[in-house]
Image (cartoon, rainbow, N blue to C red):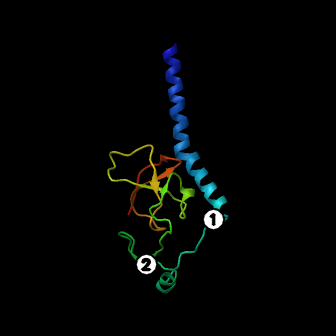
Amino acid sequence: MKVIRAIIFLVILIFIFNLFKKVLAPTLVKIIFNIVNKQTDKTLRPTTEKECLKKGGEWRRPGPWPKKVCMLKNKDEGKFCLAGFMCESGQCISYVKNLRQIPIFASGQCPKYKILFGCLQSVHFGITGQAVCLD
């Protein structure tokens, strides 16, 4: 009977952890980010090369994208973070080097650009999300 209770308890803990990791943590990070910044979108992305260069961006293709866009840099690039609300972009990223060895707990860095590409994981309160490759 004790073994069954222990198994049920373990299953419930795993369920709660997965719920926090996939739903609650990302939602809380977005809410806190919006409260701290008091707006949903800090800047509109420039649509022309002239506007982009005026705002200090780079007019180029990010990764293998077919068309050029404005790549605006974040001021806090590379800063240590545990959640997205700690970064200007609202995202805390852990870059994945090996998709077979994905950590559950990790710290991250504020991304260099507002547009993300490459293999990465979002970090929410020190817990990583699902690894995604954006190309």
Along the viewing direction, whichever of 70 and 126 lies nearer the viewer: 126
Looking at the image, which residue is at 53% across and 79% down?
46
Q: Considering only order in the chain, which callout, 2 or 1, is on the residue closer to the N terminus?
A: 1
- Residue ranking furthest to the top: 1
Residue 41's place in the image compared with 29, above or below, is below
- Helix, strand or loop under label 1: loop
At which x and y percent is residue 1?
52, 13
Residue 4's place in the image compared with 117, above or below, is above
Residue 115's place in the image compared with 93, above or below, is below
Along the viewing direction, whichever of 7 and 128 lies nearer the viewer: 128
Q: Amino acid at mark 1?
A: Thr
Q: In the visual, does 101 lie left or right of 107?
A: left
- Helix, strand or loop under label 2: strand
Tell me where residue 43 sits by quadrant.
bottom right
Q: Which residue is mark 1?
A: 40
Q: CA distance from mark 1 to mark 2?
A: 23 Å
Residue 104's place in the image compared with 51, above or below, is above
At which x and y percent is residue 131?
41, 51
Q: Amino acid at mark 2?
A: Glu
